[in-house]
Every structure is written in structure tokens, then in C-alpha cells.
Amino acid sequence: MPEGVISATTGALLRWAAGTGLTVAAGPPPPEPVPKGQAAQAHCWLLALLPEQELRPGAGANPVRLRLRYLLCAARPGDLEPLDRLLVACVGGLYQPVFEAVPAPLWAAVGAPPRPAFFVEVVVHVDRPRPAVPRVTEPLRLHAVALREVAGVVLGPGDVPLPGMRVEAGDGLAAADTDAGGRFVLPGLPAGRPFTLRLSGRGRRFHHQVPADDPRPAVIRCEFRED
């Protein structure tokens, strides 16, 4: 939720309550009753944030409607005057009271004895603006990348061709298996830079460096030694 929505709504509700001539504090009442004239006469306590509409995945930037539920209660048990003033102010006003029983565990949670109270729910709208997309002011340009083909032969001990060896470009752009003559071809690799080839087969792994733009076929000798 954007910063300020809850604080702005709570501040507006407190100003409305203060317009009744009461001293209203934000938050739950204190555990111990305070004598008259020494503290707030009523308390405005934000209890819950409830969805006013179903929140569906993929709703995009559509605004969200939420309900903020507040508890308005007297500062002292048995003191009905503050609640009378607040209820009179609700008649025909911005805030409509919701008369529901206050659960006993709610009072126990703050260690305060029960007292006269009622709920007020305020609907708020939360905008979710779409991110600005920059305009395209120039024609699209396609930058072509020069490609090269890397070919070669894989030889074993005594320069015997090794078929069935797996040859892969180090960046994973291309891969091939050697044929019966140990030959391979890796097409479509970017030109202008060297490559590391990874070879695997016969239970071994090898590496071979191919210089940048070397037109000669690569000759790779695998001696089957440990790396």
C-alpha cells in the first residue's frame, strides 16, 4: 500500500472525532483507567485492513478498494458521554457506525476492562498507476552480429580419429558429436573472439582453445590423461 493512506485516513477520523469537542487519542485504551481531566476522553483504534473487493491475480493497475476498521471507545469503563457525542456526530455524517459485539479477547489483548464502544469502517481507494512507457521516437535498428563456423577433428592416442565425442562451445551456443572420422562442425558462433571448446567422451573431459577468427580447422588431441 502506498505510504500515507492509513495515516491520512486515521488523521481525518481523529479530526472528525475532535470536532465533537472530545479529546480523542489514537490507539487502544490504557490498561488502567485514568481519572477524568487527565487523559483522552475516547480512543480511536485501527483494528483491521479488509478487502472491499476480490483481489484477483493479474488485475494490473486497476485501483483497489479496501476497508479500514476502527474501534471507537470511551477512555473509562462506564463512561457513556463520549460515545453519545460520537454517535450523534455519525448521524448523517461521513462515518457510519457498525454495531457489533466487541470480542472479549480484544480487551484482554490490551489488558483493559470492557467499556462502551462501536466500530467504524472507512473505504479507501488505492491507485496502482501503470509504469510510464517511453515513446519510440526513432526507427528500430537491427544490429547484425557476424557469425563464424568452427570445424575440426578430434584425435586420440596415435592420432586415431575419435568418433562419438561430444564437442560444445564454452558458452553453450552450439554442440555437435564427432563422426566416424572424428570430424565436427559448430556453426553460428559469433565472430571476432576466441572460444573454449569442451569435449567429453570415453569417460573423460577435455578443453581446447580456439583462437579468434582462425580459419584453420581445429586439431584436438585427447591423450586420456586426467585434467
Image (cartoon, rainbow, N blue to C red):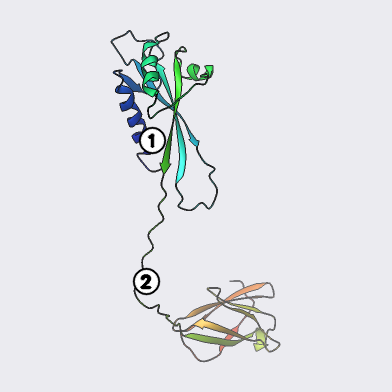
Q: Is residue 147 left or right of residue 44?
A: right
x, y percent for residue 207: 56, 76
The residue lying at 36 percent from left, 22 percent from top is 89
x, y percent for residue 226: 61, 71
Query: Above or below — where is 180 with respect to 39?
Result: below
The residue lying at 33 percent from left, 21 percent from top is 25
Q: Nearer the viewer, residue 113 or 164?
A: 113
Query: Above or below — where is 7 with respect to 204?
Result: above
x, y percent for residue 59: 51, 51
Q: Residue furthest bottom?
A: 216
Q: Is residue 222 left or right of residue 19?
A: right
Query: Above or below — where is 86 with respect to 129?
Result: above
For the residues labelled 2 and 1, the Cα–Cα distance comes to: 38 Å
The residue lying at 45 percent from left, 81 percent from top is 193
Q: Is residue 23 left or right of residue 112?
A: left
The residue lying at 42 percent from left, 49 percent from top is 128
Q: Secondary structure at mark 2?
A: loop
Residue kind at label 1, given as amino acid type: Ile
Tell me where residue 133 sits by quadrant.
Answer: bottom left
x, y percent for residue 10: 36, 31
Residue count near mark 2 (Cα–Cα under 10 Å), binned few <14, some 14–19, many ≥20: few
Residue kind at label 2, given as amino acid type: Val
The label on residue 6 is 1
The label on residue 136 is 2
Residue count near mark 1 (Cα–Cα under 10 Å), binned few <14, some 14–19, many ≥20: some
Q: Is residue 184 left or right of residue 91?
A: right
Q: Secondary structure at mark 1?
A: helix
